Image (tube, rainbow, N blue to C red):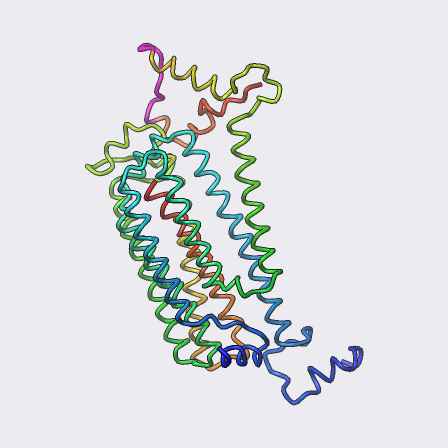
Amino acid sequence: MAQVSRTAHEEGHHHIVPVKTLVIVFAALVCLTVLTYAASRVDLGHYNIPVALAIAIVKALLVVTFFMALKYDSPTNRLVFVMGLVFVAIFLSFTLLDMYFRGDVSNVDPETIRDMQLQEETVKARMPTAPAAPAVTDSSAGAAQTTAPHTAPAE
Amino acid sequence: MATATPQIVDDVHAGPHHPSHLQHHFVSSQQQFEASKLGIWLFLMTEILLFSGLFVAYTVFRTWYPESFDAASATLDASLGGLNTIVLLASSFTVALSIHMAQRDNQRAVFINLVITVILGAAFMVIKGIEYTAKFEGGAYPGGFFDPHGHHYGHLANVPYAAQFFSVYFLMTGLHGVHVLVGMGIITWMAIRTHRGEFSSSYYTPIEITGLYWHLVDIIWIFLFPLLYLI
């Protein structure tokens, strides 16, 4: 340990991550990969997606903390990293808010507009004559996304 | 030089240890190193935001068409995806090792680890190529080119919006693959410079920031693998 800190001092305080740490982190990453693969083969109901995402987040944190050595890096770089994540969170959450609640600001109905649209679709799908499912060849084209029923603005 | 503060001139340029890698607008090697690292972290954040656009698109499309995404995702080979995850994790490990060896002044080990990293990157691209070829043969092209046929992809013709999944799949893995190729190029360049003896424990900044970039490419795959192949 003493040797490590002296070397770090001579080189301007660069922290050297020990090989042992790197090996342990790599082994943990491989184990987590096997674990997430195994977990996806088991039907956990609604928990499959959260479990897979949680394992991915742990793996990413291991890489950032030890391989990228952010743990030993300057606070400025940590701040840059955290701010990046904050902006990704804003991007994702506000897009999802718009998707689920568009038009609901002036909506006086207890249900959200998206819920009402989903119910309408369910009813339509039950009627045998109604064109419930879009034609497959049309839907394959990129144009399908602009006419997707869920996206129809509520106004 | 006369305009600078006297003691800085003494410290940096008049001293017998003025290193050749130190540029004149930096006070010390340490300041130059930290400026480079701040720069690469800022660049990596722009990379994360670039990919986050695709991750948001994935989330939105998946929320709209969960059944279609499930059906299309089931046609991917999770074993090949898992193998590629291990390959990329191993390459991250060798890059981290090369930086460790650079700090320890073991230039030969740096060179060997960088070469192994490039080989692992190439192995990743070969496995990716095998997957892409199988999809092209089955007509699983993105967007309007989607024309699934054969026993593996044929049933997707009856799944509405399955093409949407493959648009997202090819965009995300394609953009990631381009990043892997760029990384392989830069790491090759770093290996050549190491071989020429340009680096030492007092100057290995290019290897350090190349490593940070390569780790980010690895992190993006860590998320792509479960999102596309597993759930």
Can you tell which quarter of the image residue A94 is in? Answer: top right
Between A136 and B213, the one lying in front of the other is B213
Q: Looking at the picture, how far across and down is residue A147, in whole percent? A: 46, 24
In this picture, is B159 found above or below B223?
above
Can you tell which quarter of the image residue B28 is in? Answer: bottom right
Q: Which residue is drawn at 59% across and 71% down?
A: B33
Is residue A67 located in the magenta-colored stretch of the structure?
no
* Relative to A92, A59 lies left or right: left
Q: Can residue B199 be seen in this view?
A: no
Q: Looking at the picture, how far across and down is residue B119, in whole percent? A: 33, 66
In this picture, is B221 found above or below A97?
below
Q: Residue at x 60, y 82 (%)?
A: B20
Between B108 and A57, the one lying in front of the other is A57
Q: Residue at x 28, y 49 (%)?
A: B131
Q: In which quarter of the image is the N terminus of chain B?
A: bottom right
* Relative to B29, B156 lies left or right: left
First to last magenta residue range: A127-137
Q: In which quarter of the image is the C terminus of chain B?
A: top left
Between B191 and B41, the one lying in front of the other is B41
In this picture, is B206 found above or below B137?
below
Is residue A135 located in the magenta-colored stretch of the structure?
yes
